[in-house]
Image (tube, rainbow, N blue to C red):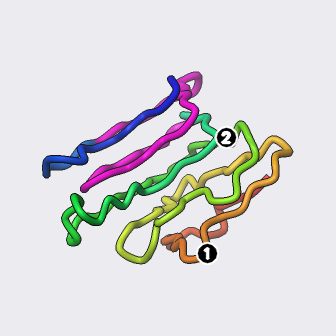
Amino acid sequence: TNGLYIGSVFSQGQSEVTVTGAGSILSSNQIALYNDSILTINDGGQVSTNNIYYDNFSFINDPSSTSTINFDNGTLRLTGSSSFIFNDFTASNTINLEAGGGTIDTIGNNVSVFNNVVFVSNFLAGYSLS
């Protein structure tokens, strides 16, 4: 798809997308997370995208809302160069690295991570950047 939007700009309530299992691939040009949304990539699942970010429509989003990305033996494959993956993922939004770890595969593209991004893990040794 050209764009995948997880959550709703105009309404509250949790939205969740899970990509799980070897051979499971979610592919989208860009992925935006909104109000209280969760993206989980686990058990060999893969998400392929040029960019993934929190869309902070401050005039619409509930300031108390959060978005979460969970990795547990999952892969985020970045299919193009990007100067701002995880844009607007600050301390109020979470990127969790579970026991299975996670891989961010740039496949040789030039990628920069948003300056204020916070990774949370008790298992940081499972995280790799390639």
> In the picture, residue 35 is in which quadrant?
bottom left
Q: Position of residue 8 (x, y in %)?
A: 24, 44
Hey, which residue is sitting farthest left in the picture? 12
| Mark 1 or 2, closer to the camera | 1
- The residue carrying pointer 2 sits among few (fewer than 14), some (14 to 19) or many (20 or more) residues within 10 Å by Cα, namely some
Q: Is residue 25 magenta?
A: yes
Determine the secondary structure under disc 1. Answer: loop
- The residue carrying pointer 1 sits among few (fewer than 14), some (14 to 19) or many (20 or more) residues within 10 Å by Cα, namely few
Say the numbered circle drawn on residue 31: none
Q: Label 1 belongs to which residue?
A: 115
The mark nearer the N terminus, 1 or 2, is 2
At horizontal 27% and vertical 44% (from top left) the residue drawn is 7
Point out the stretch of residues depicted in magenta.
Answer: 16-44
At horizontal 47% and vertical 66% (from top left) the residue drawn is 88
| Left or right of 15, for residue 71 | right
Q: Position of residue 85 (x, y in %)?
A: 61, 56
| Left or right of 126, for residue 25 | left
The residue closer to the viewer here, 81 or 21, is 81
At horizontal 37% and vertical 38% (from top left) the residue drawn is 5
Hey, which residue is sitting farthest front in the picture? 59
The residue closer to the viewer here, 99 or 17, is 17
Report the amino acid beneath label 2. Arg
Determine the secondary structure under disc 2. Answer: strand
The residue closer to the viewer here, 20 or 61, is 61
Q: Position of residue 2 (x, y in %)?
A: 52, 27
Magenta segment, prevailing SS (helix, strand or loop): strand
Q: In this picture, is 98 found above or below 109?
A: below
Q: Position of residue 27 (x, y in %)?
A: 56, 28
